[in-house]
């Protein structure tokens, strides 16, 4: 831990942070009964994945070489845009669910067949 | 005693903030508190983007996530919360299963993170810093227009013809965003209840 203050960070440090974010998102998705809480877990998972793309495409983290180059940043941008679209649709569905059930408990959605 | 690497110091600060806020999102019971911790976590991730040299993506993360998605989420919280004490909890057994699964996943991911090749694990030249990285806005924008200015030195002409950038993906994402937002506005429109036996304040606000 102390050598982190004097040595430069690398891709593996970013991967550790990304793993923590991903696991927190998975925990949030599985342990929340509020539909918007599940949505926040999905946002955390997408951010963890995005952090990996940025780290592998970074020009300064890989010791002069970056495995992905600018492709990582393009993919991360597309992920951000698709996550925003997904959040809009999921919130619209949650609002509809609330209007029909007067609750956003995901356990109440068990009569949804299909 | 080596001199202090300020890049690593700021990375440590922002990474601890991001991880602690993400854990707080999981353990918080109140949905509004979860949204506040999520704002902190997403903002810290934007800081990590800046520290990785991706300045344009950091700005996009701040504007789209912290600015746009969080406003959407908070409006969703306000439109669907019945009261300040509306806390939905799961049982203890489900918590144990979830923590077991998440712990196994974390172990696998950390093992993968610590086993990347040696020259990628840490920067070889300690002078590399975020200030050395060139601005990334115009290569990214030109790549979306179909010109890969970062791969102009591809010697093989056949391979160079294939590198047409991300113009098609950009167009598909644009159409997708328009369709999705129109569909979301259609789904979430205020419709009048068929039976008006119980009018809640939310109905009065949205109609």
Image (cartoon, coloured by chain):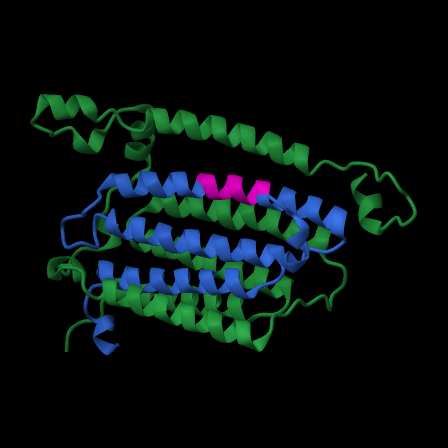
Chain colours: A blue, B green
**Lateral position of residue A79 relative to residue A61, left or right:** right
Does any portion of residue B56 appear in the rendered image? no
Left or right of residue B72: residue B118: left
Is residue B95 visible in the rendered structure shown here?
yes
Question: Residue, x 72% and y 58% (percent of image)?
Answer: B81
Magenta stretch: includes residue A83: yes
Numbered label tally = 0
Say which residue appears at 54% left-offset and 76% top-offset.
B93
In this image, B52 relative to B184: left or right? left
Query: Which residue is rendered at x = 58% and y = 40% of the image?
Result: A89
Q: Is residue B77 above or below residue B184?
A: below
Quadrant including the N terminus of chain B: bottom left
Figure check: A82 above or below B129: above
At 31% from the left edge and 29% from the top edge, which residue is drawn? B166
- Seen from the viewer's position, the closer of residues B89 and B74 is B89
Q: Where is residue B164 in the image (x, y as percent from the top left)?
A: 25, 24
Q: What stretch is highlighted in magenta?
A: A81-89
What type of secondary structure mainly makes up the magenta span?
A: helix
**In the displayed image of the protein, which residue is found farthest to the front?**
A114
């Amino acid at each position: 831990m102390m050598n982190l203050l004097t040595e430069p960070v690398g891709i593996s440090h970013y991967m550790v942070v990304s793993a923590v974010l991903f696991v927190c998102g998975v925990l949030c998705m599985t342990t929340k009964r509020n539909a918007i809480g599940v949505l926040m877990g999905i946002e955390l998972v997408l951010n963890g994945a995005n952090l990996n793309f940025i780290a592998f495409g970074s020009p300064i983290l890989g010791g002069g070489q970056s495995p992905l180059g600018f492709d990582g940043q393009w993919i991360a941008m597309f992920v951000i845009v698709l996550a925003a679209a997904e959040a809009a649709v999921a919130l619209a569905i949650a609002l509809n669910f609330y209007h029909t059930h007067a609750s956003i408990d995901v356990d109440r959605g068990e009569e949804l067949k299909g | 005693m080596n001199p202090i690497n300020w890049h690593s110091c700021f990375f440590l600060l922002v990474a601890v903030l991001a991880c602690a806020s993400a854990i707080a999102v999981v353990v918080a019971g109140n949905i509004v508190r979860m949204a506040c911790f999520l704002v902190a976590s997403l903002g810290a991730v934007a800081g990590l983007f800046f520290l990785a040299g991706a300045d344009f993506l950091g700005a996009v993360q701040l504007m789209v996530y912290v600015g746009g998605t969080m406003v959407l989420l908070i409006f969703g919280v306000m439109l669907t919360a019945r009261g300040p004490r509306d806390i939905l909890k799961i049982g203890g057994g489900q918590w144990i299963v979830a923590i077991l699964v998440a712990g196994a996943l974390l172990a696998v991911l950390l093992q993968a993170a610590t086993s990347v090749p040696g020259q990628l694990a840490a920067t070889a030249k300690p002078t590399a810093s975020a200030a050395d990285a060139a601005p990334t806005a115009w290569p990214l924008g030109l790549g979306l227009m179909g010109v890969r200015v970062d791969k102009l030195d591809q010697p093989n002409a056949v391979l160079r013809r294939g590198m047409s950038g991300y113009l098609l993906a950009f167009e598909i994402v644009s159409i997708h965003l328009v369709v999705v937002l129109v569909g979301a506005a259609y789904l979430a429109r205020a419709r009048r209840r068929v039976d008006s036996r119980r009018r809640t304040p939310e109905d009065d606000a949205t109609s």
